[in-house]
Image (cartoon, grey):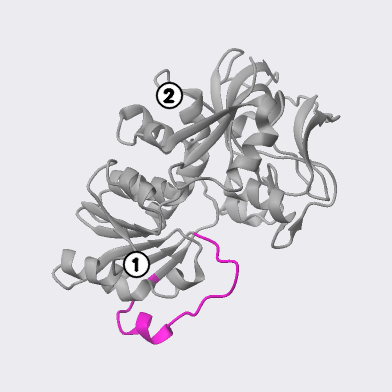
Amino acid sequence: MLALVLEPNRQLSLREIHIKEELGPRDVRIAIHTVGICGSDVHYYQYGRIGPFVVQEPMVLGHEASGTVIEVGREVKHLRVGDRVCMEPGIPDPNSKPTRLGMYNLDPAVRFWATPPVHGVLRPTVVHPADFTYKLPDNISFAEGAMVEPLAVGMHAASKAQIKPGDVAVVIGAGTIGMVTALAALAGGCSRIIISDVWQPKLDLAATLGPITPVNVTCQNSTEVVMESTDGWGADIVFEASGSAQAAAGVFELLCPGGRVVFIGMPGEPIAYDVVAAQVKEARVEHVFRYAHVYPRALALIASGKINLKPLLTDRFAFQDSVKAFEWAARMPPTSIKAQIELPQ
């Protein structure tokens, strides 16, 4: 099949590749419609690795996806040919201890699309377990369906924060993950969000999404804005979604006594963690790695109108322009949030 293939030498091409995928009794075969370009995809394209995961053989990119069911296994009851769906890209070992404990995102044996050596889905069709395939409500587009994957990260972070109605939260970073985290936090009960970034166009967009106060850290002091907005108390929750080591080192300055910090972004280097600053506020610190048991709730929130992802869908490319799309994404302008690739139908 024709696919977007990343070679071990970091060359990217749209070429034929043989991928043998047999349909099991609890699998479905899906014609891919839309695939989002994730920062991890771009990172593999630019550097050939993320931590211990190294591209050592040709690998198809893409893991944020939606499509149409074209074949179902004999034991699949909840999906039919023609159903519009989105897919959770991580397949855990059902017998592993993390999976049995309900933390399947932490299963070391999870097979995650476009994570070496597992192929991604920038290709015409894919076989996937029906248990990790979700029917799209009629009012959710394929483009929104492909956004459920990043939204799931934000919703997992919001759940980890244990939001109480009326909480004030800070989101550091106004990229895709920061934006969906802000939307998830509002849907989860936060009364307002303060979001910070270095790019004004992203902040301008964030300010249109709800009760969100933008802070440009190139000319504003985040701590001053937070304290002024909270009568000197601080934010109930701080979500670190930038992956910036410098930003992550300052999370406790923004926090109220007894507040919660949730680390989402992955810094490329160890951060300076101020233990005393955390102790004197008795801060609770959480971390997220992907998500678990989130997709149905994410789809329900989008379908109900509680979360609107449409403003984040800023750029679209045709499948035949996939290489061009990745070259563009590697230097994405600050006016863009999420770029997606559409496959021919």
User: Total of numbered circles in the picture?
Assistant: 2
Q: Position of residue 76 (x, y in %)?
A: 63, 22
Instruction: Give the mark nearer the N terminus: 2 vs 1.
Output: 2
Q: Secondary structure at mark 2?
A: loop
Q: Residues within 10 Å of mark 2 (few under 14, many from 20)?
A: some
Say which residue label 1 marks: 260
Please provide percent x and percent y for residue 175.
45, 50
Question: Identity of the amino acid at label 1?
Answer: Arg
Q: Is residue 269 magenta?
A: yes
Q: Which residues fall within the magenta stretch?
A: 265-284
Q: Residue at x 75, y 43 (%)?
A: 118
The residue at 22%/47% (across/down) is 211
Q: State the residue position of label 2.
A: 140
Q: Nearer the viewer, residue 241 or 138?
A: 241
Q: Which mark is residue 44?
A: none
Q: Is residue 211 left or right of residue 79?
A: left
